[in-house]
Image (spheres, helix red, strand yellow):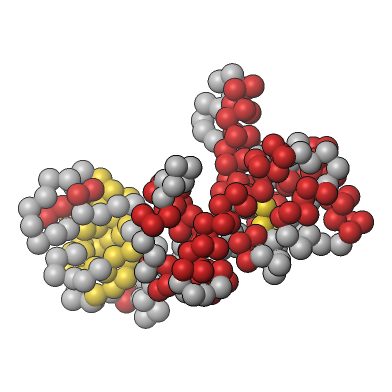
Amino acid sequence: MDPLAELVKIDPKSIGVGQYQHDVDQNKLKQSLDQTVVNCVNSVGVNLNTASSYLLTYVSGLGPQLAQNIVNFRAENSTFKNRKELMKVPRMGAKSFEQCAGFLRIPQGTNPLDNTAVHPESYHIVEKMAKDNRCSVEELIADAGLRKKIDLHRYVTGETGIPTLTDIMEELDKPGRNPRQTIQVFEFDKNVKTLDDLKEGMVLPGIINNITNFGCFIDLGIKENGLVHLSQLADRYITDPTQVVKLHQHVMVKVISVDKERKRIQLSMKGVNS
């Protein structure tokens, strides 16, 4: 499944962007929301060989007609083998190619850089880096150790500075279409299902779901939330909980008291490794 392909089918206003979304200028709101979707599509990238014409219209440099031409060309000539073949698409000019090429991905293409966000105009830089390290471009993409050895200052020219070279290296770190970091796996304690299962001294995993001036509330995987008072948040003196914690943070907490009648749980983060 391609979540991005489904996202672009939804009118951004239907997602619910705020309580006052109907009170603002609707044209400006639509323009702003559409631009956000465009930014998202361009950030993630689009698979050139599977994307619908509708998804392609959100790629910078491609309009509805050019997007449809790409789909038609793909239907007549099978899959794209590399980004250069885009120039064979009817009405694809040099300017449009320059704008859209970096956002279109080709997995298993003839050039491994076609599956990255590196723009074709910068391919020669990566190829020179690979040659200097006596490896192929594919090996350079796959081996983070090789990339760490590269001195970017050696590749600075009048047209290419350190910021551009840094961007290229960052893109080589995450080829393909998923710029998200690996999700952190989290599990509540399987032995704690109700308030009655809690005992003083237990150390449990939890998620911060609310922060107040006097502390923060922790979701322990049961109906009742536990409270870590401001004085129990750290081994040092603090005046504001946000100095040490943030919303949705995964933490380890110790149970210091359980009031079953009032259904209150007092927790501490002192001396507990999060």
Q: Is residue 248 visible?
A: no
Looking at the image, the residue that sits furthest to the left is 237
Residue at position x 73%, y 54% in the image: 84
Residue 15 picture quarter: top right
Q: Is residue 59 above or below residue 27?
A: below
Q: Is 198 displayed left or right of 91 in the figure?
A: left
Residue 271 picture quarter: bottom left
Q: Is 122 displayed left or right of 200 in the figure?
A: right
Residue 43 in the image: state x and y as whole percent. 56, 49
Residue at position x 39%, y 65% in the image: 150
Figure label count? 0
Q: Nearer the viewer, residue 2 or 59?
A: 59
Residue at position x 9%, y 61% in the image: 235
Residue 44 in the image: state x and y as whole percent. 58, 53
Residue 34 in the image: state x and y as whole percent. 63, 34
- Report the quarter where the C terminus lies: bottom left
Q: Is 200 displayed left or right of 21 in the figure?
A: left
